[in-house]
Image: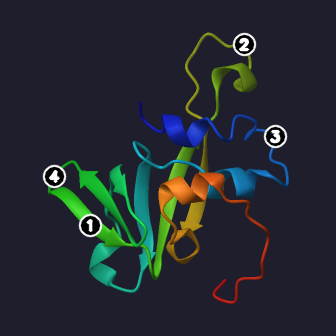
Amino acid sequence: MDGLHVRDPGGDVYNVGPNVGAKLASAEFHGANVEVVRSRCPSRVGIAGIVVRDRKFTMEIITKKKGVKVVPKEGTTFRVAVEVPEAQTGATAEPSNKKFMFDILGDQMMVRSADRANRKFKMHFLPEL
């Protein structure tokens, strides 16, 4: 189930198009592998694991060593790895290790996951980039 919910909305993620960002913004992140790559609090950078609960203002991530960590979304950038489906990588017999890495701004995800799934997202200029 590793990253299954993130992979489903972006089935055509290998052919990156203009609507991939909207699909990723409305994706369900429960069960996805995430890593904190930027945060206002330097001690949170490097936290990596599986999302067990996605709330409006926080993500609960279970790590391999230290259990469940509660990470606030505000001021945090999360990195999500989406695996490329086998059908799009070619007809090779060996397993593919191709992944797309997406950096997601926590400030833009401060919506409940149930509400985020039903919302339509538009492109906006983000001054913090």
Query: What separation in Å lies between label 1 and label 4 (alpha carbons)?
Result: 14 Å
Determine the image quadrant of residue 61: bottom left
Q: Residue at x 63, y 58 (%)?
A: 25
Name the N-terminal-most of marks 1 and 2. 1
Task: Give the quadrant of the N terminus.
Answer: top left
Numbered disc 4: secondary structure: loop
Name the N-terminal-most of marks 3 and 1. 3
**Label 3 vs label 1, nearer the camera:** 1
Judging depth in this view, the residue of 96 and 56 nearest the camera is: 56
List the residue tagged with mark 3: 15
Q: Is residue 82 left or right of residue 56?
A: right
Numbered disc 2: secondary structure: loop
Name the N-terminal-most of marks 1 and 4. 4
Name the N-terminal-most of marks 4 and 3. 3
Label 4 sits on what residue type? Lys
Query: What separation in Å lies between label 2 and label 3 (alpha carbons)?
Result: 17 Å
| Percent coordinates x, y for residue 36 in the rendering | 41, 66
Label 1 sits on what residue type? Val
Name the N-terminal-most of marks 2 and 3. 3
| Percent coordinates x, y for residue 23 in the rendering | 69, 50
* Mark 2 in CB contact with mark 3 (< 8 angstroms): no
| Percent coordinates x, y for residue 31 in the rendering | 40, 42
List the residue tagged with mark 4: 65
Q: Residue at x 59, y 38 (%)?
A: 7
**Label 2 vs label 3, nearer the camera:** 3
Label placed on residue 91 = 2
Q: Is residue 67 left or right of residue 119?
A: left
Would you call the spot at circle 3 few (<14 residues within 10 Å), some (14-19), or many (20 or more)?
Answer: few
Relative to 35, say whether 106 is above or below: below
List the residue tagged with mark 1: 70
Question: How does the figure colour the protein chain or chains?
Answer: rainbow
